[in-house]
Every structure is written in structure tokens, then in C-alpha cells.
Image (cartoon, rainbow, N blue to C red):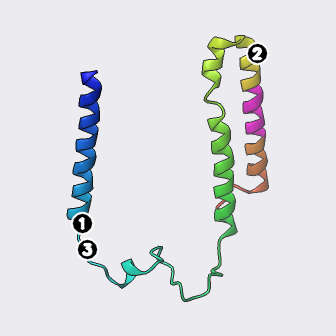
Amino acid sequence: MYNIIIIVLSILAVTAALVFAAHFLPSRKLDLENGSPYECGFDPLNSARVPFSFRFFLVAILFLLFDLEIALLFPFPQALFIFNSSHVLYIATLFLAILLIGLIFEWTQGGLDWAE
């Protein structure tokens, strides 16, 4: 019981120290750019219709798709211990084959070529 009280008091002390440090340490100098609602580097007074590279968008979407599919492979090693390993290996191989077919398709269509 005393360990829990010590942990809670330690957490509260660290939290209070961080709050005080965050309040007193930073400089409060606000210039025109930091005070504006747009700190992203774009001028908010100009048009928002800036030309955008479609290739960059395509590569970003492909990265998200393949990254998500790779993240779906993480449970397979654990599934080898829980389920029948031959079925898990078959499903993982099928999944990787679908990924490989998608990668080859994007490669042949020129979706991975940055420069034309």
C-alpha cells in the first residue's frame, strides 16, 4: 500500500515540476510570425491553390498502403504458436504474394518512378 502512495506522490511531484518548468522557462517573445494563426510557412493572404506534384501524392498514398499492409504482417509470428503453423504460413505466403503482385504492378505502371 505504501508503494502505491510513493508512486502516486512521485508522479505528482514530477508533474508539478514539469508544469512549473514549462511555465517559467520559455521566453515569451512573440513576433509577427509566431503570433499569426498560420505557422506553416505559407502566406495566408495568397491563394491556397498552389500547384502540387501529383507524383508526390501518389508516392505518399503508396507508402501508406504498403506500410499498412506490412503492419498487418506483425501478428503472423505470434499466430505460428497459437494456430496450425502450415495454415499460418500459407496465409502469410498468400498475403506476401498479393503484396508482391501489387508492387510489381506499380513498378511496371511507373508509379515508383520519381523523375519522368
Task: Give the magenta range.
Answer: 93-101
* Secondary structure mostly seen in the magenta stretch: helix
Report the amino acid beneath label 1.
Answer: Pro
* Circle nearer the viewer, 2 or 3: 3
Q: Residue at x 23, y 71 (%)?
A: 27
Callout in the foreground (1, 2): 1
Q: Residues within 10 Å of mark 3 (few under 14, many from 20)?
A: few
Q: Are marks 3 and 1 in contact (CB under 8 Å)?
A: yes
Per the rendering, the mark at residue 28 is 3
Where disc 1 sits, the SS reads loop
Picture layout, residue 71 above or below residue 63: above
Q: Is residue 69 magenta?
A: no
Say above or below: 63 vs 40: above
Amino acid under disc 2: His
Disc on the earlier residue, 2 or 3: 3
Q: Residue at x 75, y 31 (%)?
A: 95
Q: CA distance from mark 2 to mark 3?
A: 61 Å
**Where in the figure is residue 40, as x and y percent of width and height?**
48, 73
**Left or right of residue 63: residue 90:** right
Q: Residue 70, image x and y in percent?
A: 64, 37
Q: Residue drawn at (66%, 63%), measured in percent from left and top?
A: 57
Q: Is residue 77 visible?
A: yes
| Rendering quarter of residue 78 | top right
List the residue tagged with mark 2: 87
Mark 2, Cα crowd under 10 Å, few <14 / some 14-19 / many 20+, is few
Q: Quadrant of residue 90?
A: top right
* Left or right of 22 on screen, residue 34: right
- Label 1 environment density (alpha carbons within 10 Å; few <14, some 14–19, many ≥20): few
Q: Which residue is mark 1?
A: 26
Disc 1/disc 2 C-alpha distance (Å) = 57 Å
Q: Amino acid at mark 3?
A: Arg
Instruction: Identify whether 105 is placed above or below 27.
Output: above
